[in-house]
Amino acid sequence: MKLHVKRILVLSLLAALLAGVPALADFDAVVTSSSMKVYRQAEPHDQIGALPMGTVVTVKDYNGKAALISYNGKTGIVRINDLQRTVQAPAASNTAAKVMYTAKATRVYRNASTAADSAKVAAGVQVNVLSVSGDWAKVERKGIVGYMDINDLSETKDAQPEIPIFNPAPAVTPEPEVETAPVKYENKTVMTKETCPVYAEPNTASARFTLDANVIVTLVATRGNWAMIKKSGNVGYVDADLLTTEVRAVEVDTADIKPADNSGSSIFSSGTNEEIIFKFLTREMGLNAAAACGVVSNIKHESDYKTTCVGDNGTSYGICQWHASRKTRLISWCDSHSYDYKSLKGQLYYLQYELKTYYPTVLSKLKAVSNTAQGAYDAGYQFCYSFEAPANRAARSNTRGNYAKDTLWKKYKT
């Protein structure tokens, strides 16, 4: 939000309050935007934080454009359009509801579709299941209703909560499920002492990739033994003991250098899109033929190999139908690496980057499949279920696994 717009937003509410608008009875509201900006009441009305979708706050007062909220004992100004007043779930629903718990970190969706707006939910969170249809469970928590994958729920609270311990916004943080150590904001340059795992969330059960020794990163914050680091715009979590402030000029940062393309002339010089994709997966990424068949099967079903394929009312794009923020990330990454995001070459190199950076578990599973017909099925199923994650994903994963095994494997097996 530009500065003058921010000031108009904040001052409009303050003017209403100073004009003697009667105080309203406090009521709860839920954040409906992906990230709601929170501004300071006092001059100069700087942004003091942000709250993620699904956070419940108390509205103290509001006018047509802005609201004064309270959260965790702190107050701030927000856009009224980023909030929705909460309501209690109907008594009948509460009566029929079944108490369940999230068995792992997952997501809750506004509608029964993975294309709908969603928010993260930690493991071990209690929800009331109102109804089940296929793989979708209609759930309620604190008066908010949404949809979750029934396979991510358990009748017992066996899993320990995976609690986010950092919020990039320093002054307003999500309410923790348990007491945690205070966050210390650092914002300084550090270096990895040795090869170390970097986690997507501050817990060792989340997705991970590895940083080499002597890599220079920015230390954003620490809490307990966890360090939040940032490199080339990407954020992750590492053991703080694996970092040092004794930074030496030993690293050449290749994050913004175009990926090596020594085999590009032979991979992209001839063949159909299907054949080029298969060659890239096996030659450039080092997957075996079975794993490549599994990925190719998914691309076939997502886009029929068309690089300019558009889906989900314009929100998904490309051979893998990258959706919403993933589409934006595709375009940004290709632009910063001198690729045309509409080209097959650019999308394939981005796919390689995305698997390594954001889906290392999926990549590990692809590399682990046997080079057999069954391996092709497994790769097709896993890539669909964990990377593409479409609606009715179990059935679609099976379909794509079978196409990889029965059609593509017969064509490409080595």
Image (cartoon, helix red, strand yellow):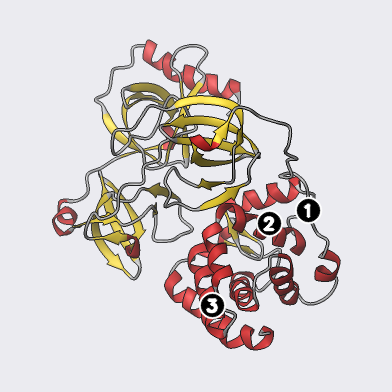
**In the displayed image of the protein, which residue is found farthest to the left?**
95
Earlier sequence position, callout 3 versus callout 2: 2
Q: Depth check: 303 or 203 in front?
A: 203
Residue 324 seen in this snapshot: no
Residue 99 horizontal side relative to residue 342, left or right: left
Q: Which mark is residue 339?
A: 1
Task: Sort mark 1 into few (<14), some (14-19) or many (20+) by Cα contacts within 10 Å.
Answer: some
Q: Which residue corresponds to mark 2?
A: 350
- The Cα atoms of the two marked residues, 3 and 1, are separated by 29 Å
Residue 263 horizontal side relative to residue 210, left or right: right
Q: Depth check: 34 or 270 in front?
A: 270
Q: Relative to 175, does residue 381 appear above or below in the rendering? A: below
Residue 228 horizontal side relative to residue 394, left or right: right
Q: Amino acid at mark 2?
A: Tyr
Locate the C terminus by quadrant: bottom right
* x and y percentages locating residue 38 in the rendered image: 45, 27
Q: Relative to 287, does residue 234 appear above or below in the rendering? A: above
Residue 380 picture quarter? bottom right
* x and y percentages locating residue 60 in the rendered image: 31, 24
Q: Which residue corresponds to mark 3?
A: 400
Q: Residue at x 53, y 25 (%)?
A: 186
Count the labels in the image.
3
* x and y percentages locating residue 13 in the rendered image: 43, 20
Q: Are marks 1 and 2 in contact (CB under 8 Å)?
A: yes
Q: Depth check: 8 or 357 in front?
A: 357
- The Cα atoms of the two marked residues, 3 and 2, are separated by 22 Å
